[in-house]
């Protein structure tokens, strides 16, 4: 009670309610990667965790996607095609997917402007910077799949998981390095799923998703840079503009060699056969010359053809293979003619050649952005947390802006993804007829531990632990006696009771759903002397029904 010295009437308010627990945010991701800009009114934001609430905020502080150069190709049978750019910087596209799938406030850690390559040390520095922001609860690396070294990709996730283990309030959403698992590494024989499992240790603080996603988004192209437009070439050309023609010429060289191998005075050359070979060579080279931006002379071989037809006995037929070889080498080095748009800017074509402009815009619109799923899943986490609660599994949900996963997964194929002998589960994203693209997995990367098998359980405990930890700060240096113990216990029980009533904890009564023990049962006299107050909290977290088994049997007729 206050000490009064002046006569009068005084008012004192007596608190009747115990202190309460303020629940922390559960789905506030940190996106770590490269951005177009990083400034706020000339204040640099590089390596500064910056909170945003919308895509407009992102564009204001960090710009848009990197502008890719336009490369076109005219192809026989297909017409004008767009050469897919090697897109390395995916932050902007990832944020589009995040907000489209329910994402809310998040942190952006720009590790620098767009350059030539994605560097692991840059992303690691961004990870270290994000640790300073306590509100962040999820870690996402949109640009990690663009690292040139696959081992660095896994090392980065190892660093993020180590940070999550240390901070106790972070959850890492992992991608696979590649978007499909059908190809194997030549050196190890592992596919991308096996690589992830072999390089990342089991952890309850992370979840992995597979495969990558083909989205409805379009790449951003630079309309102010000259277009590289390669002209017509065969549709099956690989390793060169006229690889198929080169292969045909190589076959004719072998055929000519075989024809000449058995020539003797008794067995003269089969001139008709050689005429057919030479005519075939001329036809191939003439077809190449139509589209090649190179001069290839047919004078020598045409002279041989005429000599064969005239049955010129003085012709040295043995040199025919060397002439065909010379032509083959010329064809292999030939470049195709440049297309109509070569050297022009897209904006210029709009006024000078509207037909070609519309063709280019069409092929640009048809090329869709392919992304790893982590940013999309961060949006799903945020949506589920906001609408149903962190205790609800982020699974069996449709994905917005997704055309299809990059690889179709069957029930049989998912068995090995979902249930791993070492507990390293990978959650599948699958397409179901009539349902669309669904998240079809809810496990952490440590499903062998039944306590922490499910993402929702791990994240519920993260939320409660951090919320209670923050609330208990007010009791630091309070008297370590029964009065303080009762206040702390009441505060925590009230919070857990609210969670139970919301459906986060399982049990018909509060006593079955949770318990809080504090006092002489947990804190000894020695603990008091050493300044420790021990509180034990137990929770029966709700868990997802992952496998629903319907048992049917015959019922005997009773009448």
Image (tube, grey):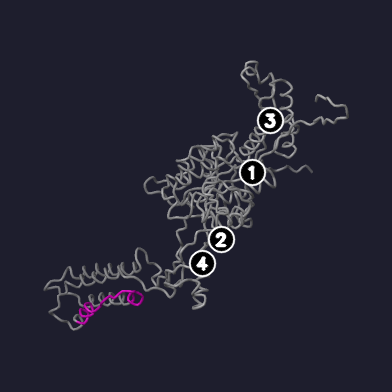
The residue lying toward the viewer, choosing from 526 and 100, is 526
Secondary structure under tag 3 reads: helix
| Marking on residue 393 | 1
Q: Residues within 10 Å of mark 3 (few under 14, many from 20)?
A: few
Q: The magenta stretch spans which residues? A: 287-306
Q: Are marks 4 and 2 in contact (CB under 8 Å)?
A: no
Secondary structure under tag 4 reads: helix
Secondary structure under tag 1 reads: loop
Separation of disc 3 and disc 4 at Cα? Answer: 58 Å
Q: Which residue is mark 4?
A: 364
Q: Nearer the viewer, mark 3 or mark 4?
A: 3
Which residue is at the far top? 525
Q: Residues within 10 Å of mark 2 (few under 14, many from 20)?
A: some
Q: Which residue is mark 2?
A: 217
Could you tell which of marks 3 and 4 lies nearer the N-terminus?
4
Separation of disc 4 and disc 2 at Cα? Answer: 11 Å
Where residue 427 sits in the image (x, y, percent)?
56, 46
Q: Residues within 10 Å of mark 1 (few under 14, many from 20)?
A: many
Q: Residues within 10 Å of mark 4 (few under 14, many from 20)?
A: many
Q: Residue at x 16, y 72 (%)?
A: 318
């Amino acid at each position: 009670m206050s000490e009064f010295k002046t006569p009068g009437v005084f008012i004192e308010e007596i608190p009747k309610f115990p202190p309460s627990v303020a629940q922390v945010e559960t789905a506030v991701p940190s996106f770590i990667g490269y951005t177009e800009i990083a400034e706020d009114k000339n204040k640099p934001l590089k390596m500064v965790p910056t909170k945003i609430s919308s895509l407009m905020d992102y564009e204001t502080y960090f710009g848009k996607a990197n502008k890719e150069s336009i490369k076109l190709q005219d192809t026989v049978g297909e017409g004008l095609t767009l050469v897919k750019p090697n897109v390395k910087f995916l932050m902007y596209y990832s944020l589009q997917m995040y907000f489209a799938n329910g994402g809310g406030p998040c942190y952006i850690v720009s590790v620098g402007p767009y350059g030539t390559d994605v560097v692991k040390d840059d992303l690691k520095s961004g990870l270290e910077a994000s640790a300073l922001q306590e509100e962040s609860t999820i870690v996402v690396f949109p640009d990690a799949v663009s690292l040139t070294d696959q081992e660095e990709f896994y090392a980065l996730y190892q660093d993020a998981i180590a940070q999550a283990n240390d901070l106790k309030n972070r959850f890492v959403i992992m991608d696979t390095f590649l978007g499909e698992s059908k190809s194997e590494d030549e050196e190890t024989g592992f596919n991308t799923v096996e690589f992830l499992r072999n390089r990342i240790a089991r952890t309850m603080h992370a979840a992995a998703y597979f495969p990558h996603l083909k989205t409805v988004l379009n790449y951003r192209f630079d309309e102010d840079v000259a277009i590289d437009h390669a002209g017509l070439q065969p549709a099956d050309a690989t390793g060169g503009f006229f690889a198929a023609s080169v292969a045909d010429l190589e076959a004719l060289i072998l055929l000519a060699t075989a024809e000449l191998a058995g020539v003797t005075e008794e067995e003269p050359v089969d001139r008709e056969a050689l005429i057919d070979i030479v005519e075939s060579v001329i036809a191939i080279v003439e077809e190449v010359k139509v589209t090649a931006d190179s001069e290839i002379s047919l004078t020598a071989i045409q002279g041989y053809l005429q000599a064969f037809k005239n049955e010129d006995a003085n012709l040295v037929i043995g040199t025919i293979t060397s002439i065909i070889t010379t032509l083959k080498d010329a064809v292999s080095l030939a470049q195709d003619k440049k297309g109509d748009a070569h050297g022009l800017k897209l904006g210029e074509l709009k006024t000078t050649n509207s037909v070609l402009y519309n063709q280019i815009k069409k092929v640009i619109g048809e090329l869709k952005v392919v992304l790893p799923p982590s940013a999309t899943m961060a949006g799903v986490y945020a949506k589920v947390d906001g609408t149903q609660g962190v205790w609800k599994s982020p699974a069996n949900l449709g994905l917005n802006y997704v055309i299809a996963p990059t690889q179709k997964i069957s029930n049989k194929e998912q068995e090995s993804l979902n249930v791993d002998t070492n507990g390293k589960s990978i959650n599948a994203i699958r397409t179901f007829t009539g349902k669309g693209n669904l998240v079809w997995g809810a496990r952490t990367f440590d499903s062998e531990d039944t306590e922490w098998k499910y993402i929702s359980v791990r994240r519920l405990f993260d939320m409660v632990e951090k919320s209670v930890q923050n609330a208990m700060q007010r009791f630091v240096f309070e008297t370590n006696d029964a009065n303080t113990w009762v206040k702390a216990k009441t505060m925590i029980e009230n919070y857990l009771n609210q969670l139970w009533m919301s459906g986060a904890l399982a049990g018909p009564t509060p006593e079955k759903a949770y318990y809080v023990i504090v006092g002489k049962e947990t804190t000894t006299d020695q603990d008091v002397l050493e300044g420790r107050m021990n509180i034990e909290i137990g929770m029966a977290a709700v868990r997802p029904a992952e496998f629903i088994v319907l048992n049917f049997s015959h019922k005997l007729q009773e009448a």
